[in-house]
Structure formats: C-alpha cells, structure tokens
C-alpha cells in the first residue's frame, strides 16, 4: 500500500481547450474554456518535421486545418501558415495552430494548469516524448505546478522520463490491455487516465492502493460524471465546459 501523494490538479479539465465549442487545440479554445471558469486544460502535442512541439490531435492536418497530409511531415514555418479555425466556424477563421510554447505562455501567465497529451506521429513515439518533455521542463521551470504529461503510448512516456524524470506522467488507457499496470508502475506514473467506462470501485481502490490517481476521459454526460465522483476518482476531462461548472 503506497500513500497517495498530494494532487495539485483540479477535478475538472477542459478537453482540447473547450471541447467542441471552439476549434480544438487553438488558443481561442483555451481562452473560451477559461471564460467558462476552467483552470486546467488538456491538449494534444506532436512534433513538426523540424522538431517543434505543436498542438494537433490527428496525425493528419486535413480535418482541423487548411493543410493536407501528415502534420509531422511539415516544418513549423509551413504549419504556422495554416488556418486551424475556419473548419469549425466562420468566427474562428484565421486562427493559427499554436506551438506548445504559445500555450505554455498563456497558461503560465494566467496560472492555469495543463495536461499535455503526447500524441506522436506514428513511428516517432520515443522522440516525441523526449522533445515534448524537454520543452515542457524548460517552459515550466520555476513554476509551482508542472504540466501533467500523458500518453496512450508507453514509448512516449519512456522518452519523457528519460529527458525530464521530474515531470509527472500518466498512462492513458482505452482498454485494460495485458500488462498495463506493470507498465504504468515501471514508467513511474502518478496517474492512470482511463476511458471513463472502465472505472469501477475495485479498479479505483486498486489504483489508490498503488499510489496512483484515477482520472477519466472524455466525460460529457451528467450521469457519467456523477458516477465517477461517487467512485472517488480524482479528475475528469470533459468537452462540456458549458454543462459542468468547475467550481462545483
Ligand atoms: O487525454 C485524454 C483524451 O484526449 C484522449 O483521447 O483521442 O481525445 O486525444 P483523444
Ligand atoms: Mg487528447
């Protein structure tokens, strides 16, 4: 039985800035999430071809920008020219892709907290973990609360641990695949971030007994949020910044 370390993060975390209400992973989305009272955000980070960590969920640019093909194939100078807002709605047309550094500046200036999901271009898992963690360590140096680094890919978390072991890590799970608990332990994780349907009382108790926090994604229904609160989980990532009040 390991003691649970103090947890500096709030329960409510706004997914990709403000869920679906603004273009995901743009600064406009984080500003909107903040207007709804959110003080912690989740974002997806990957590398440009020249190694700049920037925010994009998909491996490809097509769904959420005016670009085409694999985002990680372009240098930052070209990614910076794309429109990452117009796909969402006219009012966001012209919104650029942010680098991780842009979002770090915004969060630090406003004392907002961040969960950086390391979302590597396939094949670049370890390198993406290393570079994102290196940038995060530099950007948040001297801040009271570091960003929480998470990933579905253990190789990315191993890379993060190699360059910035002091930054907290969390393993993301969409299924309870064979060996996940040992991998989380081996990677020195402080939390598990599960598809919310996977949590039950036994699993939450098992995580807490092992010194791990229990977080959930992506929780958009009141009944699901209440179930997770009743189970004693520690954090909830939501798209519905308009439904859930983070002050509650
Ligand atoms: O970090 C939690 C959640 O964002 C994981 O899934 O696909 O929305 O990035 P996804
Ligand atoms: Mg994500």
Image (cartoon, helix red, strand yellow):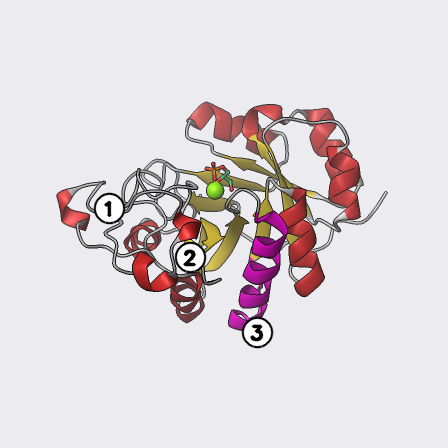
Q: Nearer the viewer, residue 42 or 12?
A: 42
Determine the residue positioned at 53% across, 47% down.
Answer: 120
Q: Earlier in the sequence, mark 2 or mark 1?
A: 2
Q: Seen from this angle, which residue lies furthest right?
A: 1
Q: Count neighbours of disc 3 (C-alpha within 10 A) and say few if under 14, some if 14 to 19, many if 20 or more.
A: few
SS at badge 1: loop
Q: Count residues near mark 1 (Cα–Cα under 10 Å), then give few for <14, some for 14-19, many for 20+.
A: some
Q: CA distance from mark 1 to mark 3?
A: 34 Å
Residue 165 visible within the image = no
Number of other residues with Cα within 10 Å of mark 2, as a class: few under 14, some 14 to 19, many 20 or more: many
Residue tagged 2: 54
Residue at x-position 86% and y-position 42%? 1
Name the residue beneath numbered marker 1.
66
Instruction: Give the residue at mark 3.
Output: 141
Q: CA distance from mark 2 to mark 1?
A: 16 Å
Say which residue appears at 38% left-offset and 55% top-offset.
Answer: 74
In percent of width and height, residue 80 lies at: 30, 60
Any atom of ligand 2 within 8 Å of the CB at mark 2? no
Residue 101 visible, this orientation = yes
Q: Residues in magenta? A: 124-147
What residue do we see at 49% from left, 25% from top?
A: 224
Helix, strand or loop at label 3? It is: loop
């Amino acid at each position: 039985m390991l003691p649970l370390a103090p947890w500096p993060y709030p329960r409510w975390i706004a997914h990709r800035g403000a869920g679906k209400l603004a273009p995901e992973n743009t600064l406009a989305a984080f500003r909107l999430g903040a207007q709804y009272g959110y003080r912690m955000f989740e974002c997806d980070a990957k590398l440009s071809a020249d190694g700049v960590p920037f925010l994009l969920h998909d491996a490809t640019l097509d769904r959420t920008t005016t670009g085409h093909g694999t985002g990680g194939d372009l240098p930052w100078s070209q990614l910076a020219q794309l429109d990452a807002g117009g796909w969402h709605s006219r009012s966001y047309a012209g919104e650029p892709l942010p680098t991780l550094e842009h979002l770090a500046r915004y969060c630090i200036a406003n004392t907002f907290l961040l969960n950086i999901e390391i979302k590597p271009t396939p094949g670049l898992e370890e390198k993406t973990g290393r570079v994102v963690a290196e940038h995060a360590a530099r950007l948040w140096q001297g801040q009271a609360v570091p960003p929480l680094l998470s990933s579905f890919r253990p190789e990315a978390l191993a890379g993060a641990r190699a360059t910035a072991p002091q930054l907290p890590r969390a393993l993301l799970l969409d299924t309870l695949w064979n060996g996940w608990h040992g991998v989380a332990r081996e990677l020195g994780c402080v939390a598990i971030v599960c598809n919310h349907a996977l949590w039950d009382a036994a699993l939450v108790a098992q995580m807490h007994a092992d010194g791990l926090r229990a977080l959930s994604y992506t929780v958009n229904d009141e009944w699901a949020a209440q179930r997770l609160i009743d189970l004693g989980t520690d954090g909830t990532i939501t798209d519905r910044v308009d439904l859930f009040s983070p002050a509650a």
